[in-house]
Amino acid sequence: MALIVQKYGGTSVGDVDRIKNVAQRVKETYDAGNQVVVVVSARSGVTNELIGRAKALNPQPDEREMDMLLTVGEQETIALTAMALHAIGVPAVSRTGTQAGILTDPSHTRARITSISGGDIQQQLAAGKVVILAGFQGYSAEGQITTLGRGGSDLSAIAIAAALKADLCQICTDVDGVYTADPRLVPDAKKLDEISYEEMLELASSGSKVMQNRAVEFAQKFNVVFEVRSSFNNNPGTIVKEEVASMEDVVVSGVALDKNQAKIVVSDLPDRPGTAAKLFQVLGSAGISVDMIVQNLGRDGKANMTFTVPREDIYRAEKAVTESFPDEAAGKLFEASDIAKVSVVGVGMRSHSGVAATLFEALAKGSVNIQLISTSEIKISVGIDPEEAEEATRLVHAAFGLGQLPA
Amino acid sequence: MALIVQKYGGTSVGDVDRIKNVAQRVKETYDAGNQVVVVVSARSGVTNELIGRAKALNPQPDEREMDMLLTVGEQETIALTAMALHAIGVPAVSRTGTQAGILTDPSHTRARITSISGGDIQQQLAAGKVVILAGFQGYSAEGQITTLGRGGSDLSAIAIAAALKADLCQICTDVDGVYTADPRLVPDAKKLDEISYEEMLELASSGSKVMQNRAVEFAQKFNVVFEVRSSFNNNPGTIVKEEVASMEDVVVSGVALDKNQAKIVVSDLPDRPGTAAKLFQVLGSAGISVDMIVQNLGRDGKANMTFTVPREDIYRAEKAVTESFPDEAAGKLFEASDIAKVSVVGVGMRSHSGVAATLFEALAKGSVNIQLISTSEIKISVGIDPEEAEEATRLVHAAFGLGQLPA
């Protein structure tokens, strides 16, 4: 008998029929002799409806009240899921985050889990019941209802799996697993059987948003092995776990594309210590997170600094730069434009050379001009023209032979 | 500075604009220097939507899960109401039933309040905040979320008013107060300035459903004076309180009509002890609550028993009677038909005679045939043909001079 945690997102529990589908899948797992904890999100759309009402009443709603409001979404789903299980003869009981003892810090709308008692979940499992746990929510030491922020239900699932020492944690979603590239862009993209936490994190931060990074980081920290799989079929998914030696045989695990980036070039910066610090302090104070950064020496011994920001921050970034460099001789905004980031990710890079060469060669063959390059230990990213980005992704995917991976 | 509890029902908080209206009213009370606790229901329609989803998944949903499900309605409203107050500069904080320490027995969907700690409500009030409390809900000693059943939000308001020793409890609803008769039937019906708990209870059980009886009984038990008033205007409402001597000057306070009744006649019952007991045990076992009961001696020394039941129970009542009296010689179902009940209510009846005569005379003048009569200390009810019921109500209302009451 294994203890399995299954998480179903908002799309998977979006309506009554989908909740029935989830119940049926949980029943199969339960009937196979397993103990099951099911973590569910709010029905898709519910959170946006609630936010809409909140904003209609108050453009800047209080964060504590926002948590009070949004947690009703999951509370509805846990009750409905329990009822659906009862209807097909599976004993089940629902638990809120508070009831499951998911203690957090008091940072409303973005709380961090500090401990998990599990409440009476172990007793309920021992009594033969499936436990349906509300994702996304916890409570503070002050007895207030808190939420874990975006992707919070994934985090709830990983965290309860860690607390209960579950044998398996399944993140059931609307994709079959983690792919070598987005299958909508790259038709021969293959599903990966397994991937390391680090690769998963690099892929996510490079635009392949299967899960939020916080949940993956939590899994890595507590060494929770989990599987990303479909809510709608029984295909095996992708196992995400600590890196093992055999993973290094695969040099590149996947190619990610992030089209939601903007490039900003600041020119005429004095080439002396403190210049970069000043620029990025200005951006940091404006709450803008910078991704890639490249510095070149420009004309007249002055430096150019190029960096990327999320596209929605481009105007705020331009404003921050312009206001902070009133004297154009000491640095000025030179260019701001959209850019796409194509990244290759793989723990095998650590032990294999030639990855950069293969990447650049593939892009050159496609006449794709590289505007920016940035690297990490297990990732190489290039910034290119958004118009060429999808074709570039296909070229790179093919160049690394990812479509040829054994199924 | 007074402590005022205001309760707003589902219609009063039915949408964003109505929540804004409630917030504005609360602000007026708060700005006048009062401490305010606001008790709110789920937005009208939400509960039915939730029940619809539950029934689609499970025709007989588990009661514990039903409570988990339905309490999201009030939780949404408290958060939205707090946000609406913040938007107009009123400090406010929401509290669930659990957070307010509304402890109940574990009877899901119909829990009884066992104690109220109030949680930190007094501290929040002392800190100058309006507290928004979720009506209808509590929690059991086992930490489970419970609900108080129909009319539960009124009960929550009365109970928290008692626990906090509030100076005033206002039940804000979609009527201006308690009337001498339903104004839709009787155009010159007058709003009552005050009424005793007992009259309120008798009117409610006679078809004037301004509030559920449980809330009024609770108010009577803990001597909570409350006011029934409109959520939409500032007219004074009706004060409901312990009977005072002056109330007896008014012989009849109101006329109530209940058209949702059915009359059942069982004939040929042996005229000996135990006959009535057997009949009503049968109905009690079937979960049917009987209202008026009249017994006559019939033909051949056998008795007829006539009683009324809620109209929705008529078929179950017929079935129970038929199955329990297989030998027609020892009692048989003689008649089952719809009936309307017109009642006059007033504490003044205790000290005034002639009420029955006035009532019967009024009906006789209108050629209304009386099928059944039942009386209590402060009420006389008659069962009549539903076709004649509305006209009869107007005749009785006029006969007691209720339309002439000083405004």
Image: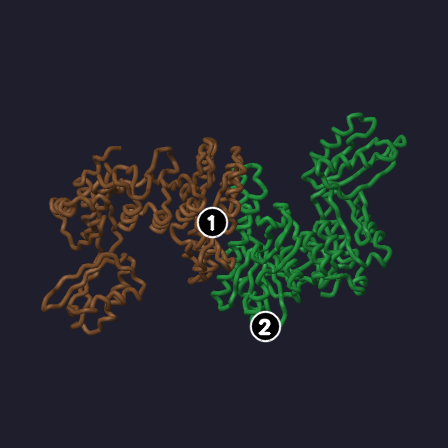
Chain colours: A green, B brown
Residue type (three-letter) at the residue carrying disc 1: Gly
The chain identifier of the residue carrying mark 1 reads B
- Which secondary structure lies at badge 1? helix
Q: Which residue is mark 2?
A: A33
Where residue B347 sits in the image (x, y, percent)?
24, 45
Callout 2 touching callout 1 (CB < 8 Å): no
Quadrant of the image for the N terminus of chain A?
bottom right
B138 to B228, vertically: above or below: below
User: What is the crowding at mark 2: few (fewer than 14 residues within 10 Å), some, or many (at least 20)?
Assistant: few
Can residue A184 be spotted in the picture? no
A401 to A390, vertically: above or below: below
Q: Which residue is mark 1?
A: B73
B179 to B329, vertically: above or below: above
Figure quadrant of residue A239: bottom right
Quadrant of the image for the C terminus of chain A?
bottom right
User: What is the crowding at mark 1: few (fewer than 14 residues within 10 Å), some, or many (at least 20)?
Assistant: many
- Residue drawn at x 31%, y 47% as measured from the top left: B209
Can residue B266 be spotted in the picture? yes
Where residue A9 sits in the image (x, y, percent)?
59, 56
- Is B92 left or right of A266, judged from the image as shown? left
Between A334 and B407, which is closer to the camera in this rendering? B407
- Residue drawn at x 27%, y 49% as measured from the top left: B202
- Which secondary structure lies at badge 2? loop
Q: Tag on residue A80? A: none
- Is B254 left or right of A369, judged from the image as shown? left
Residue type (three-letter) at the residue carrying disc 2: Gly
- Is B222 left or right of B368, judged from the image as shown? right
